[in-house]
Image (spheres, rainbow, N blue to C red):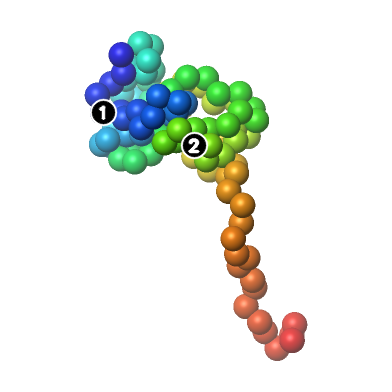
């Protein structure tokens, strides 16, 4: 059982997505475990469905979206502070040209 404010997009996912904002300090049910949120969870933000180890893939919509850069506990926020993207870069953002580097 999981809090109805959280959405599982695919059975293969190891994250849940917030359907609505959930305040910090609130205790929620994640896969039959009670978890107290350390920080506010905004709508559309992700939390770990269960524990995720360093280097493990993060799955959303059943597809890998990144890898954990640190251990992530069940119910912990999953975002750029603890994952790296696995997407292949399709472009490079260059520094603007200046007279000094022309």
At x 64%, y 71%, the residue is 94
Q: For the residues labelled 1 and 2, say whether their Cβ atoms are less than 8 Å apart.
A: no
Which quarter shows the C terminus? bottom right
Mark 1: give few (<14), some (14-19) or many (20+) Cα within 10 Å: some
Residue 4 in percent (x, y) is at 24, 24
Report whether 47 appears left or right of 88: left
Does label 1 or label 2 sit earlier along the sequence?
1
For residue 3, what is the image quadrant?
A: top left
For residue 85, what is the image quadrant?
A: top right
User: As displayed, is residue 74 above or below residue 66?
Assistant: above
User: As displayed, is residue 23 above or below residue 99?
Assistant: above
Q: CA distance from mark 1 to mark 2?
A: 22 Å
As drawn, the label of residue 56 is: none
At x 61%, y 52%, the residue is 88
Please tell me which residue lies in front, 70 or 24. Answer: 70
The residue that label 1 is drawn on is 5
Report whether 1 appears left or right of 53: left
Mark 2: give few (<14), some (14-19) or many (20+) Cα within 10 Å: few
Residue 95 in view (yes/no): yes
User: As displayed, is residue 41 above or below residue 4?
Assistant: below
User: SS for tag 1?
Assistant: loop
Report whether 15 appears left or right of 55: left
User: SS for tag 2?
Assistant: strand
The residue that label 2 is drawn on is 63
Among all residues in the image, which is located at the extreme right?
A: 101
Residue 54 in percent (x, y) is at 64, 27
Residue 100 in percent (x, y) is at 74, 85
Residue 70 in view (yes/no): no
At x 43%, y 23%, the residue is 49
Query: What is the tally of numbered marks visible in this picture?
Result: 2
Among all residues in the image, which is located at the extreme top?
A: 32
At x 27%, y 35%, the residue is 19
């Amino acid at each position: 059982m999981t809090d109805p404010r959280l959405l599982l997009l695919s059975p293969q996912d190891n994250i849940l997505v917030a359907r609505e904002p959930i305040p910090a300090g609130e205790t929620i049910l994640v896969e039959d475990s009670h978890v107290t949120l350390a920080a506010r969870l905004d709508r559309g933000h992700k939390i770990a469905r269960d524990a995720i180890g360093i280097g493990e893939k993060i799955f959303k919509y059943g597809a890998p979206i990144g890898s954990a850069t640190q251990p992530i506990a069940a119910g912990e926020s999953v975002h750029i502070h603890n994952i790296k993207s696995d997407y292949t870069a399709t472009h490079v953002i260059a520094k603007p040209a200046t007279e000094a580097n022309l």
